[in-house]
């Protein structure tokens, strides 16, 4: 199988590792890829969010499967353009990707499907935003209605900061705050059949103890030793299958990767958000534990044959990833700094580039992450931090508490 992988971040590096590890794959082409992916796959230059350019490249390389990593190409219709060429694409149509592209649309789907989620209002002006903030009270949750690269959400006790974020975004969804541990669940689906992957937890705040502004994610771990038994079955029954059924009813079936972001509240699991693709950095830990060949799984979802796919197999143990971020991230990350120590197994590239002289340079806010497995969560955590300590990047920073609460048994799930 020839696979074209679209994207160039940490998620795509993790996907590339999984794809090249599938013995059914003879060639992986990544577009545009990154220096880390270049070590295991062929790179091609393409505008990832240009549907016609990606479709033309898929034809040129004679791809049997196109795997679309980021959200922007999906919302732009890249999967539609690829399928129009008769090539299997893993990723939802532009219409179905609205589950991520519009928070308002996602809420409409959840309401119609009876999915448990936070109460919310869509607001387009200061007056309606102020009313919604006062109705729900603090902590205030304000979400950019559109795509914002994982940084469109503000959760704050400061009402003025919430109003300012809403004004900056223009159109927002204001929600009630959901208290409880958060869980990320990836579900591979062909629109009807659906297979859940291992639940994971990521860390959105930039600083230790969940301090500072939201980011695209500073680390993750899997599995979740504290997760209630039956959690995945409950989410599949109450969230995933009703959502897929509602999308089919509307004539826009969702096929690809449905990311379900959850809060485990005193009232039970509640959906925080849907995404239409693998999450970053959770992908790094979930795929590190997946023993089932990745390309075969994604191809089954892309071709409507997932119901016949064998049960998923998982490696024993745990996985942890820790993100190394550039100086100034997330507000104004500095780029162009030299990176050393990144040429080891387990280092995932997220925002890097090669200089003309071959030096590895920072090229984004989240630059690298150290991803490691171990027989248990504590061992995986120690190994991930050992990888991070070997990376040298001027001014960089990382959280020091990824998975610490889980290792120490400090996460309480409401009864």
Image: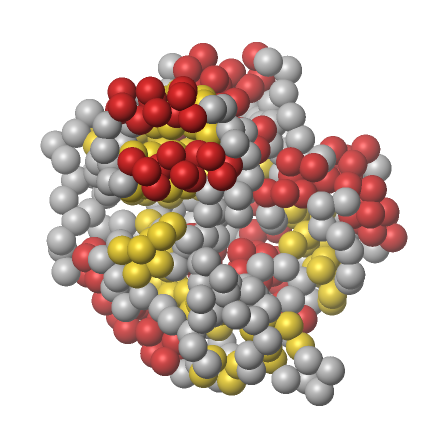
* Residue at (42% x, 74% y) in the render: 396
Instruction: Locate residue 399: give its quadrant.
Output: bottom left
Residue 264 in the image: state x and y as whole percent.
Answer: 24, 35
Q: Which is more toward the observer, 218 or 187?
A: 218
Residue 401 drawn above or below residue 122: below
Residue 385 drawn above or below residue 406: below
User: Do we see residue 62 in this rendering?
Assistant: no
Q: Which is more toward the observer, 145 or 61?
A: 145
* Residue at (67% x, 77% y) in the render: 354
Horizontal side, residue 23 vs residue 123: left or right = right
* Residue at (41% x, 39% y) in the render: 164
Residue 412 in the image: state x and y as whole percent.
Answer: 14, 44
Instruction: Locate residue 232: give its quadrant.
Output: top left
User: Do we see residue 172 in this rendering?
Assistant: yes
Residue 363 drawn above or below residue 311: below
Instruction: Locate residue 298: give its quadrant.
Output: top right
* Residue at (45% x, 58% y) in the render: 331
Residue 126 in the image: state x and y as whole percent.
Answer: 42, 26
Horizontal side, residue 220 vs residue 31: left or right = left
In what quadrant of the picture does the C terminus appear? top left
Q: Which is more toward the observer, 102 or 197?
A: 102
């Amino acid at each position: 199988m020839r696979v074209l992988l679209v994207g160039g971040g940490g998620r795509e590096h993790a996907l590339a590792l999984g794809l090249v590890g599938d013995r059914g794959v003879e060639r992986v082409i990544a577009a545009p890829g990154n220096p880390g992916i270049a070590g295991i796959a062929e790179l091609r230059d393409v505008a990832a969010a240009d549907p016609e350019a990606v479709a033309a490249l898929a034809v040129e390389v004679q791809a049997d499967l196109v795997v679309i990593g980021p959200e922007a190409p999906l919302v732009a219709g890249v999967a539609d353009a690829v399928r129009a060429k008769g090539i299997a694409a893993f990723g939802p149509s532009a219409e179905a990707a609205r589950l991520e592209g519009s928070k308002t649309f996602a809420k409409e789907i959840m309401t119609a499907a009876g999915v448990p989620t936070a109460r919310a209002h869509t607001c387009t002006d200061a007056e309606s935003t102020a009313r919604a903030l006062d109705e729900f009270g603090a902590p205030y949750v304000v979400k950019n209605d559109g795509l914002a690269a994982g940084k469109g959400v503000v959760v704050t006790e400061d009402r003025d900061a919430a109003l300012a974020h809403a004004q900056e975004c223009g159109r927002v969804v204001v929600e009630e705050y959901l208290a409880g541990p958060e869980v990320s669940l990836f579900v591979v689906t062909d629109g009807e059949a659906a297979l859940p992957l291992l639940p994971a937890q990521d860390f959105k705040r930039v600083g230790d103890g969940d301090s500072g502004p939201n980011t695209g994610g500073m680390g993750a771990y899997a599995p979740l030793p504290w997760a209630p038994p039956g959690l995945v079955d409950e989410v599949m029954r109450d969230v995933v299958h009703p959502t897929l059924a509602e999308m089919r009813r509307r004539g826009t079936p969702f096929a690809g990767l449905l990311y379900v972001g959850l809060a485990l509240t005193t009232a039970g699991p509640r959906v925080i958000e849907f995404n239409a693709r693998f999450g970053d950095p959770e992908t790094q830990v979930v795929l590190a534990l997946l023993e089932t060949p990745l390309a075969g799984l994604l191809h089954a979802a892309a071709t409507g044959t997932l119901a016949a796919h064998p049960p998923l197999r998982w490696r024993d143990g745990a996985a942890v990833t820790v993100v190394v971020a550039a100086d100034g991230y997330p507000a104004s990350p500095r780029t162009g700094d030299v990176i050393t120590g990144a040429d080891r197994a387990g280092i995932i590239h997220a925002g890097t580039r090669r200089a003309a002289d071959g030096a590895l340079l920072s090229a984004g806010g989240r630059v690298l992450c150290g991803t490691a497995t171990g027989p248990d969560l504590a061992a995986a955590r120690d190994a991930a931090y050992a990888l991070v300590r070997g990376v040298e990047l001027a001014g960089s920073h990382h959280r020091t508490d990824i998975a610490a609460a889980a290792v120490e048994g400090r996460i309480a799930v409401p009864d």
